[in-house]
Amino acid sequence: MRLRYQEIVGKPVVTRDGEDLGRVADLVAEPRDARLCVTALLVGPAALIRRISFKRAAFFRAVPPRRVPWTLVTRIDDRVHLSLDRATFQAFDVSGATAAHEENVAEEQKRRKKK
């Protein structure tokens, strides 16, 4: 599935049972061969703050961005639809791991700026 960044960011994300999880604030991508592939969506207000500024690292410890693995996306129309219902998604939610990862990224960027 080939989509542009602008076609995904800002869309509401809903679970299989129609529950709203928030809007897509940003994407996580990894290089594969000669292109970038989306691996996760960052959803909700904390993800939006992450997109705006890394200076709010303390905020992420309290309220981490919600990370939605791309493998859970079943289709995209006016909303992003997931394959899990809300209860299963909440049990599956890996946002805590995302917070630690985001702090590591912010620290790495600070180190690069100092060099």
Image: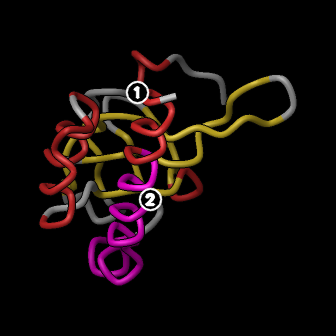
Badge 2: residue crowd in 10 Å (few <14, some 14–19, many ≥20): few
Q: Looking at the image, which residue sits at the far front?
A: 115
Name which residue lies at 36% across and 80% down: 88
Real-space CA distance between mark 1 and mark 2, rounded to the nearest whole angstrom: 22 Å
Expressed as whole percent of the image width and height from the top left, the position of residue 61 reads: 20, 65
Q: Residue 68 carries which label?
A: none
Residue at numbered disc 2: 101
- 59 to the left or right of 103: left
Task: Indicate the position of residue 34 as horizontal and vertical percent values.
Answer: 84, 23
State the image coordinates of residue 71 (x, y, percent, origin top left): 59, 56
- Asked whether residue 33 is drawn in magenta, I would say no
Q: Which residue lies furthest to the right in this view?
A: 33
Locate the N terminus and report the quarter of the image it occupies. top right
Q: In this view, does 30 lie to the left or right of 114?
A: right
Q: Quadrant of residue 97?
A: bottom left
Residue 2 sits in quarter? top right
The scheme the figure's colours follow is secondary structure
Residue 104: in magenta span: yes
The residue shown at (51%, 32%) is 112
State whether the magenta stretch is mostly helix, strand or loop: helix
Question: Label 1 is placed on what type of residue?
Answer: Ile
Where is mark 1, residue-wise? 8
Mark 2 residue type: His
What is the span of residues highlighted in magenta in the rendered image?
A: 85-105
Which residue is painted at 17% across and 48% down in the image?
Answer: 46
Whether tag 1 and tag 2 are in contact, CB under 8 A, the answer is no
